[in-house]
């Protein structure tokens, strides 16, 4: 019976496996092959050329990668802090209002990311919506916060909030109320309940939300270009430039592969720490 279930499971997963092979692994293989081609030579007949990878260090592209990873890490940490109380309320407190809040957050995803970011530009720019009202009421102007690292991180937090909020709410919902109540009855204070009950038991949601937010933020491009005005060059911007204006596909592919390997390693490490059966509601 167990062998039959395993065969049925393999057959059921076959369509998705084919889709992943064609839509995910095949493009990655093409990018990997382009990364070892000589420049402006679209052929595998030549010997592998790894010069594009050496350029990553010699021309300072590693700085863009460090900036992208650093801003992604900062935005993920901020998202975890600001989403925890909201996710806790959605999972434990708000009741029917949770549906209204969920719809409100999801509705924001119906509007293009670029349009929303340009809306912030019009709001925060010098002479924009905020300064216009402040100057009209007080006669005082202010320095625009645009075109810097903090505003880029703000944009990452703003755009990727749903990707932290919903997994975190799911993780917190997995924490039994009886366990928390038992800890309180035994004399635990709120900090002890948070650190010894809530966070460990909600760890799957924390890990999934953090991974989603970090991976998306590390490869983000619009935030640094629209809000940051390229005050900081993100690795995704270097990839786009190499493929378009530079017409250096091996370099763009090499930068992409370096980012994919680093993000993939972090994602696999995080997923290995997650109890997927618990997230899917399956009991062992």
Image (cartoon, rainbow, N blue to C red):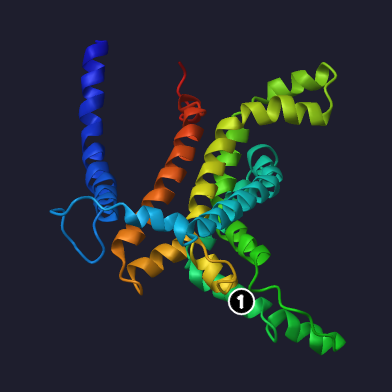
**Would residue 242 be seen by someone viewing this image from the given angle?**
yes
Residue positioned 45% across, 58% down in the render: 58
Considering depth in this image, is 98 or 175 the residue closer to the camera? 175
Residue positioned 59% across, 47% down in the render: 165
- In the rendering, at what x and y percent does residue 282 appear? 45, 23
Q: Quadrant of residue 181?
A: top right
Residue positioned 60% across, 49% down in the render: 73
| Above-or-below relation of 225 to 134 | above
Q: Quadrant of residue 103?
A: bottom right
| Residue 119 placement, left or right of 267 | right
- In the rendering, at what x and y percent does residue 220 appear? 49, 59
- In the rendering, at what x and y percent does residue 30 appear? 24, 52
List the residue tagged with mark 1: 121
Considering depth in this image, is 212 or 176 the residue closer to the camera? 212
Within 10 Å of disc 1 (Cα), the crowding (few <14, some 14-19, many 20+) is many
**Would residue 103 be seen by someone viewing this image from the given angle?**
no
Question: What is the quadrant of the C terminus in the image?
Answer: top left
Residue positioned 63% across, 34% down in the render: 172
Q: Secondary structure at mark 1?
A: helix
């Amino acid at each position: 019976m167990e062998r039959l279930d395993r065969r049925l499971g393999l057959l059921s997963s076959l369509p998705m496996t084919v889709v992943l092979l064609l839509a995910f692994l095949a493009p990655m293989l093409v990018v990997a092959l382009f990364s070892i081609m000589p420049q402006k030579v679209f052929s595998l007949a030549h010997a592998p050329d790894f010069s594009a990878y050496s350029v990553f260090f010699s021309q300072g592209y590693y700085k863009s990668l460090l900036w992208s990873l650093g801003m992604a890490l900062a935005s993920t940490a901020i998202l975890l802090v600001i989403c925890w109380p909201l996710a806790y309320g959605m999972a434990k407190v708000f009741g029917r209002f949770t549906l209204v809040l969920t719809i409100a957050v999801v509705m924001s995803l119906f509007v293009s990311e670029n349009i929303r970011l340009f809306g912030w530009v019009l709001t925060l720019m010098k002479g924009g919506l905020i300064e216009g009202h402040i100057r009209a009421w007080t006669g005082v102007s202010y320095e625009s916060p645009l075109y810097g690292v903090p505003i880029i991180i703000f944009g990452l937090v703003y755009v990727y909030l749903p990707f932290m909020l919903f997994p975190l709410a799911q993780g917190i919902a997995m924490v039994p109320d009886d366990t928390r109540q038992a800890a309180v009855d035994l004399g635990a204070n709120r900090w002890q309940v948070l650190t010894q009950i809530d966070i460990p038991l909600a760890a799957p949601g924390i890990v999934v939300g953090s991974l989603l937010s970090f991976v998306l933020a590390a490869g983000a491009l619009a935030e640094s270009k629209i809000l940051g005005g390229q005050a900081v060059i993100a690795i995704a911007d270097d990839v786009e430039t190499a493929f378009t204006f530079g017409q250096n596909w091996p370099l763009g592919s090499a930068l992409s592969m370096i980012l994919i390997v680093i993000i993939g390693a972090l994602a696999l490490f995080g997923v290995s720490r997650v109890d997927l059966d618990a997230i899917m509601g399956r009991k062992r």
